[in-house]
Image (cartoon, rainbow, N blue to C red):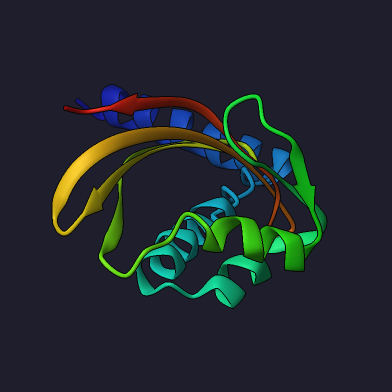
């Protein structure tokens, strides 16, 4: 019994020494997740200025699948405003974060009826959107 305890303590000691020598792993950057939450919130509140503020200077929005790039916060604000409506809502139903890339699946509803599902790819750098591009769209009825 004592030998097992001593072996466990030895392994823990070696692990602790190695961990302090190598240093702890850096914490994951959660800013892309925070930007995703802010994006959904601004969409649903119709806050076009808030949406544009999520983009970095020089950030780019691709307007539709295979569409033209829209650059600059004012142009991005106007492009996103065209997608909003008084009874439209957006629900992020799935998100995957890998490094500074976030893939989102967003349900789009009018008057509470979900009619579309869009997949978006977002690149976040320094807590701001560097690029946002739709990569798939599906009409649900």
Residue 54, image quadrant:
bottom right
34 sits to left or right of 108: right
Task: Tell me how many marks there are.
Answer: 0
Q: Position of residue 112 (x, y in %)?
A: 13, 56
Q: Residue at x 52, y 58 (%)?
A: 82
Vertical arrangement, residue 132 with respect to residue 135, above or below:
below
Vertical arrangement, residue 132 with respect to residue 10, above or below:
below
Q: Position of residue 121 (x, y in %)?
A: 56, 34
Q: Residue at x 74, y 61 (%)?
A: 75
Residue 101 in view here: no
Q: Viewer-proximal residue, 75 or 13?
A: 75
Q: Position of residue 44 (x, y in %)?
A: 35, 66
Q: Viewer-proximal residue, 32 or 85?
A: 85
**On the rendered image, what quadrant is the N terminus found in?**
top left
Residue 64 in view here: yes
Q: Residue at x 57, y 52 (%)?
A: 32
**On the rendered image, what quadrant is the C terminus found in?**
top left
Q: Position of residue 137 (x, y in %)?
A: 41, 27
Q: Viewer-proximal residue, 4 or 60?
A: 60
111 sits to left or right of 95: left
Q: Viewer-proximal residue, 73 or 68?
A: 68
Q: Residue at x 58, y 35 (%)?
A: 64
């Amino acid at each position: 019994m004592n030998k097992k305890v001593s072996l466990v303590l030895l392994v823990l000691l070696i692990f602790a020494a190695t961990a302090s020598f190598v240093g702890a792993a850096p914490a994951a950057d959660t800013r892309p997740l925070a930007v995703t939450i802010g994006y959904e919130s601004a969409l649903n509140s119709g806050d076009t200025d808030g949406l544009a503020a999520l983009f970095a200077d020089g950030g780019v929005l691709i307007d539709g699948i295979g569409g033209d790039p829209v650059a600059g916060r004012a142009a991005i604000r106007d492009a996103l405003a065209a997608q909003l409506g008084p009874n439209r809502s957006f629900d992020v139903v799935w998100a995957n974060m890998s490094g500074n890339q976030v893939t989102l699946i967003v349900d789009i509803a009018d008057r509470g009826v979900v009619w579309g599902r869009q997949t978006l790819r977002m690149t976040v750098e320094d807590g701001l959107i560097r690029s946002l591009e739709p990569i798939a769209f599906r009409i649900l009825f």
